[in-house]
Image: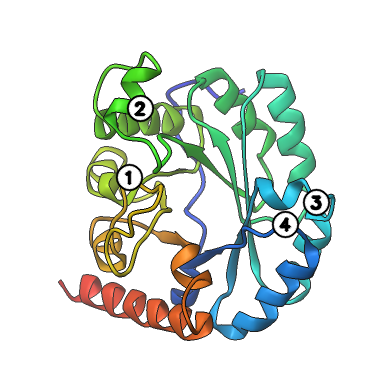
């Protein structure tokens, strides 16, 4: 077993430019999932599947359908349990065509067990730091002192030391995360709002360009695409903004 200071020993997931947009496939079942996959077509190449779909009993059918269409898959089930249980789940999931998977970033021993169990697979583990629907007041109500940025960085460093490949965190913390963890640690940012704050449950959201300028490797977008009058056009517009952001950053 690796020691707690060994850090990550794998390169970040190699991503094409159009794989840096991850669509949150938050739907109740397989028929709706397949409808969205067909509707978005080649505008989206990476999908996140989470807890809502899990309750349908069709989770792995959708995972297989995505893989059969050449899509990348992000399993966002935020595993959190005793180390042995999480290790067993990660070993099992590593047999599926999964690119990203989330575990909670609250327990170093659990994260290290997950990282050890994931050795030899192509799957990258992301630690959940602080949910984007939470702010400082929410943390304090849970007995956690400190502002989100400090807690996110603290948990990211613990995840990195445990051998986890990256974190999922608000774009507001992307810059301090990148400074703290370096270039080889993956940062995936959910809660992205291309048009600015939308007045929904995302309390720490940023725009597309800011997330990438500050160090994000990929972004997760759900409602701004699903609720758009033309979802495919909305996805393509985000893809174009990502391409511009990455080009500008590489020239800076």
Q: CA distance from mark 3 to mark 1?
A: 28 Å
Residue 208: x and y in percent read 31, 66
Mark 2 lies on a secondary structure that is helix
Mark 3 lies on a secondary structure that is loop
Sequence-first disc among 3 and 4:
4
Q: CA distance from mark 1 to mark 4?
A: 24 Å
Query: Which quadrant: the N terminus?
Result: top right
Q: Mark 4 Cα within 10 Å, few/some/many (few <14, many 20+)?
A: some
Instruction: State yes or no: discs 3 and 4 in contact (Cβ < 8 Å).
Output: yes
- Residue assigned mark 1: 203
Q: CA distance from mark 2 to mark 3?
A: 30 Å
- Residue assigned mark 4: 28
Q: Mark 1 Cα within 10 Å, few/some/many (few <14, many 20+)?
A: some
- Residue assigned mark 3: 56
- Residue assigned mark 2: 138
Q: Is residue 129 left or right of residue 250?
A: right
Query: Which quadrant: the C terminus?
Result: bottom left
Which residue lies at the image location 27% right of the left edge and 29% below the top edge? Answer: 136
Which residue lies at the image location 80% right of the left edge and 51% below the top edge? Answer: 56
């Amino acid at each position: 077993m690796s020691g707690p200071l060994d850090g990550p020993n794998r390169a970040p997931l190699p991503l094409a430019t159009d794989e840096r947009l991850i669509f949150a496939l938050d739907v109740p079942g397989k028929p709706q999932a397949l409808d969205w996959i067909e509707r978005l077509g080649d505008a989206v190449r990476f999908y996140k599947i989470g807890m809502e779909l899990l309750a349908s009993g069709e989770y792995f059918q959708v995972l297989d359908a995505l893989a059969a269409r050449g899509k990348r898959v992000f399993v966002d089930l935020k595993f959190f349990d005793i180390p042995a249980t999480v290790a067993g789940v990660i070993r099992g999931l590593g047999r599926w065509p999964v690119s990203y998977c989330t575990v909670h970033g609250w327990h170093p021993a659990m994260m290290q067990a997950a990282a050890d169990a994931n050795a030899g697979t192509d799957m990258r583990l992301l630690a959940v730091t602080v949910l984007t629907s939470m702010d400082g007041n929410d943390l304090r109500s849970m007995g956690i002192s400190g502002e989100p940025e400090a807690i996110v960085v603290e948990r990211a460093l613990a995840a990195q030391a445990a051998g986890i490949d990256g974190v999922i965190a608000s774009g507001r913390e992307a810059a301090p995360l990148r400074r703290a963890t370096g270039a080889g640690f993956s940062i995936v940012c959910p809660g992205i709002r291309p048009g600015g704050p939308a007045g929904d449950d995302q309390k720490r959201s940023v725009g597309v360009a800011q997330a990438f300028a500050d160090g994000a490797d990929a972004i997760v977008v759900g409602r701004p695409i699903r609720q758009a009058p033309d979802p495919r056009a909305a996805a393509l517009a985000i893809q174009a903004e990502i391409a511009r952001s990455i080009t500008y950053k590489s020239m800076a």
